[in-house]
Image: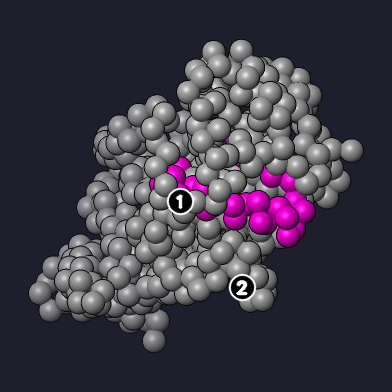
Amino acid sequence: MSLISTHNLKLVLGGQTVLDSVSIAIARGEIVTIVGPNGSGKSSLLRALIGALKPADGSITRAEGLRIGYVPQKLQIDATLPLTVQGFLNLPRRQDRAVVTQALNQAGVPDLAKRQMGDLSGGQFQRVLLARALLNTPDILILDEATQGLDQPGAAAFYHQIEDVRRDMGCAVVMVSHDLHVVMAASDRVLCLNGHVCCEGTPEIVADAPEYRALFGTGTQGALALYRHEHTHSHDHTHKHEDH
Amino acid sequence: MLDDFVVRAALAGVGVALAAAPLGCFVVWRRMAYFGDATAHAALLGVALALSLDLPIFGGVLVVALAMALIVSGLNGRTVSADALLGVLAHGALAIGLVAVSLLPNQRVDLSAYLFGEILAVTKTDLTVIWGGATVSVALLVWRWQALLSATLSPDLATASGVNPKREQLILTLALALTVAVALKVVGALLIAAMLIIPAAAARPFSRTPETMAIMAAILATISALAGLAASFVFDTPTGPSIVTVAAILFALSAGIAPILRR
């Protein structure tokens, strides 16, 4: 049985239908990437999965006692709000110190507990958000454009971290991203979204699908290959790869 | 001791300071300054309502402030030029309140008392109401503190961890209406928002956690209330504005010290 699934899901935002008849199912332990142009309803789909958006039609089914870890697209903390990383991780429920330390370790930022949230770099901030999502040992990790604002090596490093987390914790991962080449290589399955599910399958199948090419062109296919090349040869991450 | 009007004034000022400052932190963090303004200004309309229906002032103000706060927080969810709309509500409420009070038949209402407060005329009953309201307001914040902070940071993140951001917004709305109602007598409708925002803003440079900021704000607000009261005796100035003036001076000092602290 799947962890979470939608059946003919329809979402309406401000009177506009952003998604229609979307049926997806996420299985335990798989990495699913959702790609789609701006305004294709990617973020709305994730918000519906976490329960922040109510379906206008259709249904969402969650496995009993499903624990969700959510990493939002961005989090603007007002400069007037003083908050340490530790304080942030203790919201809304206070956590054991050991749990906080472990989550920071898993997210790859063991030494940040006492720092102010406002003083973190973009990459550190995203990892703290990841640590927060890992606190309750989620069955499923949901990431919304989690690498926005990171440079390409930073984004690649972040996704490697996600793969490590999946390997160590066995959680499913659902993510939305523009970083197609990086993300797709790490995915078991790719969903291409544009108001509805255009196509889905393994990264290769989706990258070759006419629906996907119609939306993104063929350029990203080359980028996908480029990433693979880099991956198998384990070059360092400053290697030039923005030439598509 | 309570027979001395100065003691009563001091206690009233401290009560309002303690209620307003922690709530003011949320107003600042959530960028709801106009929200505080609109609710506070609606208090005048509450005064008119209470006088015309022969109800206790506190009750009338509480009801109207709550209604206004609910309207505004309902608008908050939408994105349609919220800023301008809040401005309209804040100033519209003030103007309509002034007109309504002046239209009351057979009433000689001392308008300046409601606009700027009359802390020196606080009775023992007023004190009970102020401290009762302040206690409830602070208790609400303490009770919901973690959830309120989560909802303030990100409604979606809060939802994902099982906190309903709409309910937390409602809690804040309630606390705000209550604080406005108890603060009216002390600083008046025009300056309630100042008591919310200024101590919180002044506390920011000295705080590394939200909790310390709330406590610092309460301390600074208390100092403002007592020093403002004293200053109004010495210089024979209106008390409400004197309290806010002290708060503003504390803010200026804090803003001046802040760059040195950061080094």
How far from the left and from the top, in percent, is residue B209?
44, 71
Label 1 sits on residue: A237
Most prominent secondary structure in the magenta stretch? Answer: helix
Q: Is residue A168 magenta?
A: yes
- Quadrant of the snapshot with the C terminus of chain A: top left
Q: Nearer the viewer, residue A220 or B199?
A: A220
Q: Secondary structure at mark 2?
A: helix
How far from the left and from the top, in percent, is residue A99?
67, 71
Q: How crowded is the residue under tag 2: few (<14 C-alpha within 10 Å), some, or many (20+)?
A: many
Residue B96 versus residue A194 in the image, above or below: below
Label 2 sits on residue: A101
Residue in view at x 63 percent, y 19 percent: A208
Q: Pinpoint the chain carrying mark 2.
A: A
Residue in view at x 50 percent, y 73 percent: A111
Residue B140 versus residue B4 in the image, above or below: above
Q: Earlier in the sequence, mark 1 or mark 2?
A: 2
How far from the left and from the top, in percent, is residue A179?
50, 36
Q: Residue furthest right?
A: A1
Q: Pinpoint the chain carrying mark 1.
A: A
Q: Nearer the viewer, residue A117 or B192?
A: A117
Q: Residue furthest bottom?
A: B1
* Left or right of A240 on screen, residue A230: right
Residue A146 versus residue B208 in the image, above or below: above
Q: Secondary structure at mark 1?
A: loop
Q: Amino acid at mark 2?
A: Thr
Residue B65 shows up from this direction: no
Q: Which residues are magenta?
A: A148-177
Cα–Cα span, label 1 and label 2: 28 Å
Which of the two discs, 1 and 2, sits closer to the camera?
Answer: 1
Q: Quadrant of residue A32?
A: top right
